[in-house]
Amino acid sequence: MAKGHRSQIKRERNANKDVRPSATLRFARVSVQKACFVLDAIRGKDVETALGILEYNPRYASSLVKKLLESAIANAENNNGMNRENLYVAECYANKGPTMKRIQPRAQGRAYRIEKRTSHITVVLDER
């Protein structure tokens, strides 16, 4: 059993919020596995290097992640007053979103299911 009243527990849990600048893209039309290939390439890099990697990466997810990273940089500069030169990608991950189920007709009256997967992509920055 938890100690304390329900409101007290929630207050303590909300007190240690993450104050690092971040950006989230929800319901991105790319699977988690394909997004992770791109995210693994930029994790831990400074933002200028990460933008360069994303610019010349041929994968579709790189264009989504590039836009997301630029949004996180803008959040850091405008909301937190951080300097762009000191920023790096502290965390980046993709979580599974809802899957759209579609039907593909096949031979002899059969139907195959096609799963169009989505993901929720998050980029968290921090200062060195």
Image: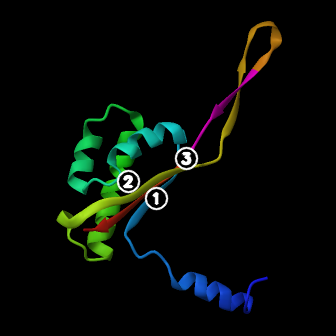
Q: Does the stretch in magenta take in 8?
A: no
Q: Tell me which label, 1 or 3, sits earlier in the chain.
A: 1
* Residue drawn 25% across the image and 64% down it: 87
- Rounded to the nearest angstrom, the CA distance separating label 1 from label 2 is 7 Å
State left or right for residue 128 relative to residue 98: left
Kind of residue indicated by mark 3? Ser
Query: Looking at the image, do the residues carrying marks 1 and 2 touch, with CB atoms under 8 Å apart?
Result: yes
Residue 59 - label: none
Check whether the beta carbons of the residues at disc 3 and disc 2 lie within 8 A of each other: no
Q: Amino acid at mark 2?
A: Leu
Name the amino acid, label 1.
Thr
> Which residue was labeled with disc 3?
119
Q: Is residue 114 magenta?
A: yes
Taking the spot 25% from the left edge, 77% from the top edge, the residue there is: 81
For marks 1 and 2, the one nearer the N-term is 1
The span shown in magenta is: 112-119
**Which residue, as the protein is rendered here, is positioned at the far left?**
85
- Return the x and y of residue 91 as percentages of the image width and height: 41, 58
* Chief secondary structure of the magenta portion: strand
- Label 2 sits on a secondary structure element that is helix
Query: Alpha-carbon distance for marks 3 and 2?
Result: 13 Å
Secondary structure of the residue carrying tag 3 is: strand
Vertical order, 9 against 96 (above or below) = below
Q: Which mark is residue 24?
A: 1
Residue drawn 46% across the image and 42% down it: 36
Left or right of 57 in this view: 122: right
The C terminus - image quarter: bottom left
Depth check: 50 or 98 in front? 50
Residue 118 shows up from this direction: yes
Q: How many numbered marks have been drawn onto this rendered protein structure? A: 3
Which residue, given by chain and number where applicable, does mark 2 sit on?
68
